[in-house]
Image (cartoon, rainbow, N blue to C red):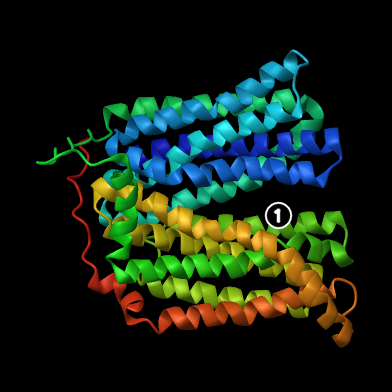
C-alpha cells in the first residue's frame, strides 16, 4: 500500500486545489455576470467535454503507459488555472476564455480517472482493493469539503488569482509524488502484437462496450447505475431549491456541510477496513436506504431532517463507489480496464444531464399541481418530486434484484488475473 498511499496523498491535495478553483471561478463568473444561466454554462463546460472524451481516453489509457497518462493528465489540468491567472493578471480575461480553458482542463482530467482506476489493482493486493477504493472515495469527498471551505474563506483574502496559484501548487505536489513513485511503480507489460492487422481506433473504442455486453451480470449492473442515477439525481439537484423554499442560505450551507461530512466519515471507515464483502448486495442495500431517505425528505423539510438525509445519501455513495470500483477491478482484465472503466463511467453519468433537464419541468408541471391539491404549502411541488423518486428508486432496485445474472455476478464471473506484487 505504500506506493498507492504516496500517489493517493498527492492526488488528494490536488483535488482540494481543484475544488478551490471550481469555487473561485464560479464565484467570479456569477459576480461578473449576475446570471444563473452563465453559471450553469460554466458547469456544463466543466463536465460535458470530459463525458464526451471518456471513450477515447479509455482506449488510449489501455494503449499507453498508465503512469505517464497520469503525468499527462495532471500536467494538462494545470493549463486552465495557469491560463486564467495569466489573462486575469494582464486584465484580458473574458467569459469565453474561462469556458474554453475550463473545457480544456476537463478533457485532460478525463484521462486521469480511468488511468488511476486501472493502476490501483497493480499497486495493492486483492484483499486491499476495498480499502484502497475507500481511500479514493475519501479524497473525493474531502476535496469537496475542504475545497469549498478554503475557497470560501480565502476568496475574500487572496481573490481569484490567489486561489488559482494555490491550485497550481497542489498540482505540482501531485506531479511530484507521482514522479517520486516511479521508482516503485510497476513497469507496464508490453502489449502483445496481434497476428493480423492492428485493430482500428474504432474497434478499440468499441472493445470496452463489447466486453460489458458479453457479460450480462456487468451489463445489468451498469444499467442499474444508469437508471438509479437518472432517478436519484432528479432529487439531488433539487435539494438546494427545496431547502431555500422554506429556509435561509445559511441553512443550505449547514445541509451541504453535514452531507459531505457523511461521505467523508463513511469513506474514512472504509479506508481503514476491507470494505463490504458482498459487493452487489451492498450496492443494492444502499440504493434501498436512499429510497427511504429521499421519501422522508419529501415528507418533512426541517433543516435537520434534510441534513440527516443528505448525510445518509452521500455516506451511502461512499459505500457504493468503493464497492462498485472493487467489483469492476476484480472482474476486468488489466489490458481492458481503461476502455471498460471509461464506458462504465460514461454510461452511468450520461443519465445525469437528462435528470437535470427533467427535474425542473417535473417539479413545475407535475409536482406543483399535486401539491396545490394536497395543500402542501411553499416548496410543495419540489417535495412531491421527492415523494415520487422514493418509490421509483425501490422499483429500480427490485427489477435489478430479480435478475439472477446480476444478483450472482460477483460469484459467477471469474476474477481477472492480477500481476505480481510490487518490489519495494
Q: Is residue 75 above or below residue 403?
A: above
Query: Is residue 97 something that shows in the picture?
Result: yes
Please state if 66 lies on the left or on the right of 23 as rendered.
Answer: left
Front-most of 267 and 212?
A: 212
Q: Is residue 283 above or below residue 419?
A: below
Query: Residue 172, position in %: x, y?
Result: 51, 24
Secondary-structure class at tag 1: helix
Query: Residue 263, position in %: x, y?
Result: 58, 58
Please state if 399 lies on the left or on the right of 254 as rendered.
Answer: left
Please state if 252 lies on the left or on the right of 286 as rendered.
Answer: right
Quarter holding the N terminus is top left
What is the total number of numbered labels drawn onto the structure image? Answer: 1
Query: Residue 334, position in %: x, y?
Result: 25, 48
Residue drawn where x is 66% and y is 66% of the image: 234
Residue drawn where x is 67% and y is 59% of the image: 356
Query: Residue 114, position in %: x, y?
Result: 40, 45
Specify the quadrant of the image occupied by residue 151. Answer: top right
Question: What residue occupies the far top of the structure in this picture?
Answer: 90
Q: Is residue 250 above or below residue 83?
A: below
Front-most of 12 and 412?
A: 412
Question: What residue occupies the far bottom of the structure in this picture?
Answer: 374
Residue identifier under label 1: 257
Quarter holding the C terminus is top left
Residue drawn where x is 59% and y is 59% of the image: 352
Specify the quadrant of the image occupied by residue 72. Answer: top left
Query: Is residue 124 something that shows in the picture?
Result: no
Amino acid at each position: 500500500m505504500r506506493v498507492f498511499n504516496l500517489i493517493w496523498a498527492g492526488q488528494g491535495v490536488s483535488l482540494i486545489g481543484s475544488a478551490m478553483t471550481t469555487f473561485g471561478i464560479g464565484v467570479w463568473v456569477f459576480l461578473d455576470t449576475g446570471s444563473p444561466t452563465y453559471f450553469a454554462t460554466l458547469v456544463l463546460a466543466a463536465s460535458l467535454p470530459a463525458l464526451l472524451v471518456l471513450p477515447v481516453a479509455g482506449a488510449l489509457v489501455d494503449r499507453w503507459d498508465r503512469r505517464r497518462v497520469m503525468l499527462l493528465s495532471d500536467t494538462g489540468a494545470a493549463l486552465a488555472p495557469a491560463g486564467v491567472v495569466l489573462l486575469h493578471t494582464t486584465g484580458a480575461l473574458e467569459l469565453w476564455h474561462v469556458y474554453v480553458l475550463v473545457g480544456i482542463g476537463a478533457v485532460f482530467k478525463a484521462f486521469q480517472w480511468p488511468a488511476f482506476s486501472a493502476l490501483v489493482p497493480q499497486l495493492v493486493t486483492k484483499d486491499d482493493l476495498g480499502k484502497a477504493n475507500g481511500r479514493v472515495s475519501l479524497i473525493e469527498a474531502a476535496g469537496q469539503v475542504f475545497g469549498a471551505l478554503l475557497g470560501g474563506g480565502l476568496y475574500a483574502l487572496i481573490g481569484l488569482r490567489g486561489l488559482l496559484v494555490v491550485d497550481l501548487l497542489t498540482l505540482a505536489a501531485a506531479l511530484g509524488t507521482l514522479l517520486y513513485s516511479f521508482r516503485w511503480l510497476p513497469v507496464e507489460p508490453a502489449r502483445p502484437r496481434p497476428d493480423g492487422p492492428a485493430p482500428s481506433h474504432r474497434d478499440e473504442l468499441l472493445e470496452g462496450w463489447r466486453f460489458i455486453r458479453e457479460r450480462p451480470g456487468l451489463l445489468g449492473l451498469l444499467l442499474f447505475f444508469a437508471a438509479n442515477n437518472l432517478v436519484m439525481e432528479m432529487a439531488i439537484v433539487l435539494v438546494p431549491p427545496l431547502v431555500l423554499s422554506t429556509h435561509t442560505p445559511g441553512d443550505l450551507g449547514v445541509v451541504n456541510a453535514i452531507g459531505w461530512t457523511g461521505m467523508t466519515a463513511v469513506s474514512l471507515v472504509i479506508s481503514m477496513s476491507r470494505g463490504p464483502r458482498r459487493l452487489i448486495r451492498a450496492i443494492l442495500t444502499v440504493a434501498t436506504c436512499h429510497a427511504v431517505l429521499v421519501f422522508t425528505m419529501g415528507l418533512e423539510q426541517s433543516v435537520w431532517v434534510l441534513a440527516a438525509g443528505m448525510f445518509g445519501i452521500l455516506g451511502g455513495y461512499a459505500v457504493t463507489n468503493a464497492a462498485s470500483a472493487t467489483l469492476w477491478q476484480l472482474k476486468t482484465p488489466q489490458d481492458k480496464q481503461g476502455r471498460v472503466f471509461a464506458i462504465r463511467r460514461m454510461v452511468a453519468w450520461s443519465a445525469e444531464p437528462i435528470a437535470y433537464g427533467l427535474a425542473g419541468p417535473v417539479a413545475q408541471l407535475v409536482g406543483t399541481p399535486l401539491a396545490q391539491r394536497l395543500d402542501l404549502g411553499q416548496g410543495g411541488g419540489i417535495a412531491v418530486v421527492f415523494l415520487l423518486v422514493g418509490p421509483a428508486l425501490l422499483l429500480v432496485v427490485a427489477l435489478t434484484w430479480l435478475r439472477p445474472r446480476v444478483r450472482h455476478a460477483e460469484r459467477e464471473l471469474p476474477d481477472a488475473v492480477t500481476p505480481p506484487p510490487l518490489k519495494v
